Amino acid sequence: MQRVGEVIRSSTSGFTAQCYELDCFPPLGGLVKTKSADCELFAVVFNAATTGIDPGRKPLARGKDESSEEALYKASPQIARLLKSEFEALSVGYKEDNKIFQYLPPRPVPIHSFVYTCSDADVVQFSSQFEFLNTLLNSAVSLPHEELIAAVLRNISRVHEDKHSFLVAAGKHLATTLSGDYNRLRTILERIKQ
């Protein structure tokens, strides 16, 4: 479990976290967690961006005469201090009294809560059920739901001992949930092939 950032915007449906290191985001579809006083909140990363710290001042290209990105940052070390990396995460469940609930938490996490990547054990425990997929399917995220769900399932399957069985079980859940929408189901299933 690695600390990757800190919550800078929070709501019941999710949060935005600023990374401590520039461009060191969890992957798209990665499961992260943060803690409040009485529970651990699980969330799925659905967007990441590096921008200038001053919203009215856009970063400019500066590397025309540099041989590499590393040389650019070495020649202009202030650049790293003028940028920030953030990621957005959608709440998909929480853990209270050692029991996991796969629906929105009762309250948002506090601002400045630390955000961690989930351990393999956390991921396996959380993914023993598939109700969180319904939250993803019905969310108002800014990218196609099929892409996000496929990324989540690919990430989660990597920590399961039997990846194939996990993906088959997830596919069956989605087949039931999306029984009236064959095109969406097919898109997700094509993208989880590894």
Image (cartoon, grey):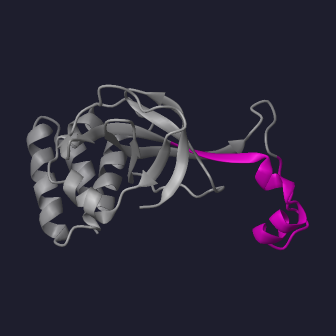
Note whether residue 164 is visible. yes
Q: Is residue 118 above or below residue 58?
A: below
Left or right of 193 in this view: 176: left
List x then y, in percent, for residue 159.
Answer: 27, 67
The stretch of residues the image draws in magenta is 60-87
Q: Is residue 54 magenta?
A: no
Residue 98 spot, x, y in % from top left: 20, 47
Which residue is found at the position 91% from the left and 67% from the top?
A: 65
Tell me the quadrant of the picture where the C terminus can be found.
bottom left
Left or right of 161 in this view: 123: right
Name which residue lies at 31% across and 39% down. Answer: 39
Residue 152: % across, % down: 32, 53
Camera-side residue: 28 or 145?
A: 28
- Residue at horizontal 52%, vertical 32%? 111
**Seen in the image, is 30 located left or right of residue 125?**
right
Rendered view: 78 above or below 88:
below
Location of the N terminus by quadrant is bottom left
Q: To which quarter of the image does residue 17 belong?
A: top right
Q: Is residue 33 above or below residue 68?
A: above
Q: How many marks?
A: 0
Q: Nearer the viewer, residue 177 or 25?
A: 25
Q: Is residue 192 visible?
A: no
Q: Is residue 7 above or below residue 5?
A: above
| Image quarter of residue 78 | bottom right
Residue 44 in the image: state x and y as whole percent.
37, 45
Image point 50% across, 46% down: which residue? 114
Q: Nearer the viewer, residue 140 or 52?
A: 52
Closer-to-camera residue (4/27): 4
